[in-house]
Image (tube, rainbow, N blue to C red):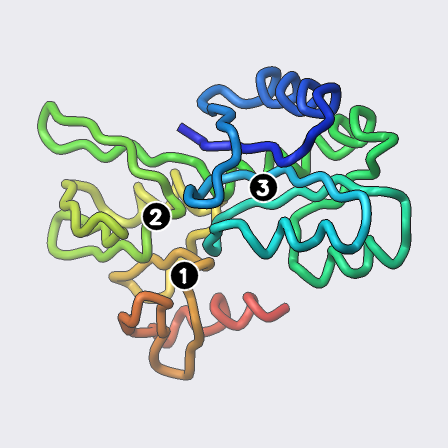
Amino acid sequence: MIRCTIISQDQIKKKMIETFLKENIQEFEINEFLMTRQYDIYFIEIKCQDDLQKYMNIKRNLDTLIYMIGPENFEILQKSLCYQINLYFKSHQLENELYFYKDVVLKQIQEHFRYYIYQKGSMKVKIRLSDIFYIESLRHQIIIHSINGEMHERKNLKELMKEISEVGFIQVHKSFVVNKRKIKSYNAKEIYLNNGEVIPLGRMYKETIHELNQ
């Protein structure tokens, strides 16, 4: 379930966003904003530069999506972009812009919150792709390394890549597939992930990893 929250006092705008989400996303919930909780998607309305403090108060990680709603003011827009938000919607055109940028928003949501169905025997478990650091091939199985630990599945990397290559995963070695958003740095031989693990970089896959900087 994708957890969304809308930080705004404008009930009309909140209804617009809620309607947009209901029409385009299957599994989501809208929660009242609490500073102590972390959400997957934030819609934050600002009216002046001082309101940008709302952004500083939210809990977030690398996969959090943040959409700002504000006035058609160049200085506020520029300041907002410094915070690496995903999109800025003009307040007086919110409904039109939600649908104008619909494909962009849905692609971002899909890339960040798509699930992989892990299966072992009769058991099926949904794993959020953004929670996976890397996937390792060992003999006739794959090992999924995620924030929740390791999961083993009888499948090969070629089969797996058909399912996840379009949503931020790249093969960097004959035995390793990595989540691009989890890469901290790399050199000619190794890839360093943001959880502290180190993955080998295969000679045949160096061109693939270099494309990340293009």
Which residue is drawn at the image coordinates 28% and 32% (left, top)?
126
SS for tag 3?
helix
Q: Nearer the viewer, residue 118 or 148?
A: 148
The residue type indicated by label 1 comes to Lys
Q: Earlier in the sequence, mark 2 or mark 1?
A: 2
Mark 3: give few (<14), some (14-19) or many (20+) Cα within 10 Å. some
The answer to whether the residue labelled 2 contacts the one labelled 3, judged by CB atoms less than 8 Å apart, is no
The residues bearing labels 1 and 3 have C-alpha atoms spaced at a distance of 16 Å
The residue type indicated by label 3 comes to Gln
Residue denoted by label 1: 182
Mark 1: give few (<14), some (14-19) or many (20+) Cα within 10 Å. many
Residue 160 locus on image (x, y percent): 31, 43
Residue 57 locus on image (x, y percent): 55, 52
Residue denoted by label 3: 108
SS for tag 2?
helix
Which image quadrant: the N terminus?
top left
Which residue is drawn at the image coordinates 40% and 56% (left, top)?
179
